[in-house]
């Protein structure tokens, strides 16, 4: 008798849990649909307008980045020429540090040129743009610091 009573309690509890699960699922669906509807009704602009704004901002960012990379490229070119001229003097002919900096600057300059070509050909991804900009900036700083100290 006690066993039968326990079985009935367990069955009753399972039925309650099924009902609760159904209620939670229905509530979740209702909440999701309400949220979607509220988002659609309160959106400040249409999707087409928003995509247009994103496209314009992306283009502007791309142009700004390209302009900055071109500046870095020019600065690297000038510093590489200046460093090469200093190496050719007798005083710095054996300066290994400057040789290392110049070789790294040439590699960075080539990276910047590659990213600029990618921008024009098919568009570069954001990570490549950031890496090229950061590397160019570091190379410029190191070369300026080193050349000015000599």
Image: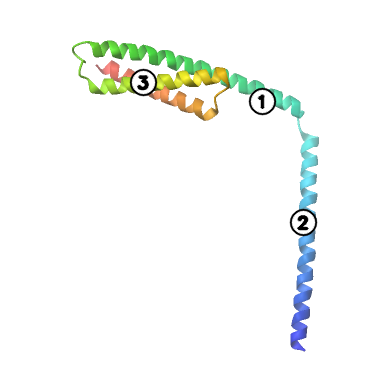
Q: Which badge, 3 or 1, comes first in the chain's sequence?
A: 1
Which residue: 79% across, 59% down? 23
Which secondary structure lies at badge 2? helix
**Label disc, if present, on residue 25 of the rendered structure:** 2
Q: CA distance from mark 3 to mark 1?
A: 35 Å
Residues packed near mark 2 inside 10 Å, few (<14), some (14 to 19) or many (20 plus) = few
Q: Are marks 3 and 1 in contact (CB under 8 Å)?
A: no
**Label disc, if present, on residue 54 of the rendered structure:** 1
Q: Quadrant of the C terminus?
A: top left
Left or right: residue 117 versus residue 21 is left
Mark 3 sits on what residue? 105
Q: Are marks 1 and 2 in contact (CB under 8 Å)?
A: no
Q: Which badge, 1 or 2, comes first in the chain's sequence?
A: 2
Asked which quadrant contains residue 13, the reply is: bottom right
Left or right: residue 49 versus residue 110 is right
Which secondary structure lies at badge 1? helix
Left or right: residue 114 versus residue 100 is right
């Amino acid at each position: 008798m006690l066993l039968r009573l326990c079985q009935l309690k367990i069955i009753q509890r399972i039925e309650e849990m099924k009902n609760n699960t159904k209620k939670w699922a229905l509530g979740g669906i209702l909440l999701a649909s309400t949220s979607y509807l509220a988002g659609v009704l309160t959106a400040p602009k249409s999707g087409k307008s928003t995509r247009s704004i994103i496209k314009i901002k992306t283009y502007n960012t791309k142009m700004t980045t390209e302009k900055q990379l071109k500046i870095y490229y020019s600065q690297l070119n000038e510093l590489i020429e200046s460093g090469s001229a200093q190496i050719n003097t007798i005083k710095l002919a054996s300066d290994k540090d400057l040789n290392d900096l110049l070789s790294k600057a040439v590699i960075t300059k080539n990276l910047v040129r590659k990213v600029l070509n990618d921008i024009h050909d098919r568009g570069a991804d954001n990570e490549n743009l950031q890496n090229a900009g950061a590397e160019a900036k570091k190379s410029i700083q190191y070369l300026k610091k080193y050349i000015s100290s000599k």
